[in-house]
Image (tube, rainbow, N blue to C red):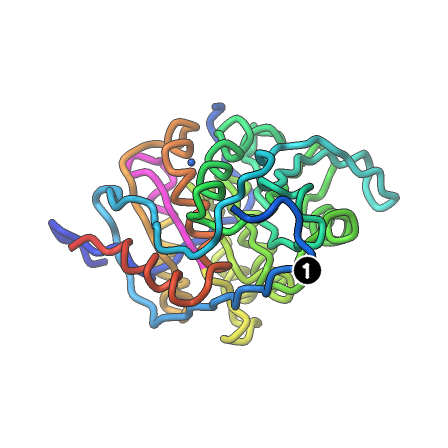
Amino acid sequence: MQIGGVLRVFLIGTLLSLAASGCSTPVSPPSTLTSPPPPATPVRTHPAPEVLQTESPSQVPLSTTATMTPCSGSEGKITLAEIDHPSLPRTLPFRVYLPPCYDEQPERTYPVLYLLHGLQGTDAQWDDLGIDETANTMIERGILPPFLIIMPWQRTGIEIETAVIDVLIPHIDQTYRTRSGPEWRAIGGVSRGAGQALRMALTHADMFSILGLHSPATLNAEGLILQWLLAIPMEQRPDVWMDIGDHDSLLPSAQSLLTLLSQNDLAAIVHIYPGDHTSDYWRAHIADYLHWYAAHWMNASSLEAWKLERIID
């Protein structure tokens, strides 16, 4: 692992996790559109693998290079819903973040981000971390394009992979104005949720192209992970982000899995920030997380500018 006094944060390394371990409790288009805007060209990035550890968080300001027009209509909002489906032992509650101007632009369609909670969390965890307030600010300022955020609750008895893949995603695509295809769909999670997101992204590469692992809880399952990874064609492997606190007890297992994945040609953006396995840690980096996911739905030049801003000279 390369460690220096002044380090660059760029596309490299990678990390994983499965289910196990716990998670601490815990920023103007017209009002109507007569036709949908032309879709951006989603960008896939698969650089050569290399391991990098960062010693301090990036202090680079949020990107202002995106060319989206800020929304001047309604604010984004979170609504609560649930699904009663015969394949589930009980109802599946979930929260939906609808971006600013969703109602005012009925012809527009949107990318979707699925976020999973940790072991002791519920569908409220990301809401409590301030995901909607941060998304509103960044979208309203034109920093990021508008997108939906879906936050399911893994209640006791619910197998989350079945619930998300077989029930939740079809329901969301039928109920809301989403863009289809893995290039428009991202998944991520904190702690145990990060491990579950990893499993889904690797075993359902036709569903997701973007993966976020935030303080991932790890289980010694390198064999399974390697099996899943090698089954995915190179061009279908997801773009990966991993971050974890430098005082997180899960850091050693994260680093060993980072090595495993980097040795098998899966690259990622990796950040090791000051902090522990706490809500305060995740809350401090919500804007960076949203940048990572939504940057893929900018145009190519905006994404490249975003990458350059992550370099610390």
Q: Quadrant of the C terminus?
A: bottom left
Q: Is residue 206 above or below residue 150?
A: below
Is residue 146 located in the magenta-colored stretch of the structure? no
Q: Which residue is mark 1?
A: 35
Work out whether residue 26 or residue 18 is closer to the camera in this orientation and state it.
Answer: 26
Residue, x 40% and y 50% (percent of image)? Answer: 242
Q: Position of residue 157 (x, y in %)?
A: 74, 35
Give the residue at the far left of this rendering.
5
Neighbour class for label 1 at 10 Å: few (<14), some, many (≥20)? few
Q: Is residue 156 above or below residue 166?
A: above
Give the residue at the far right of this rendering.
86
With 227 as the anchor, is 207 left or right in this view?
A: right
Q: Position of residue 277 (x, y in %)?
A: 39, 32
Q: Quadrant of the N terminus?
A: bottom left
- Residue 160 image-quadrant placement: top right
Q: Position of residue 247 (x, y in %)?
A: 29, 34
Magenta residues, start to end: 240-253
- Residue 123 image-quadrant placement: top right
Residue, x 39% and y 58% (percent of image)? Answer: 14
Work out whether residue 49 or residue 32 is closer to the camera in this orientation and state it.
Answer: 32
Tag 1: residue type?
Ser
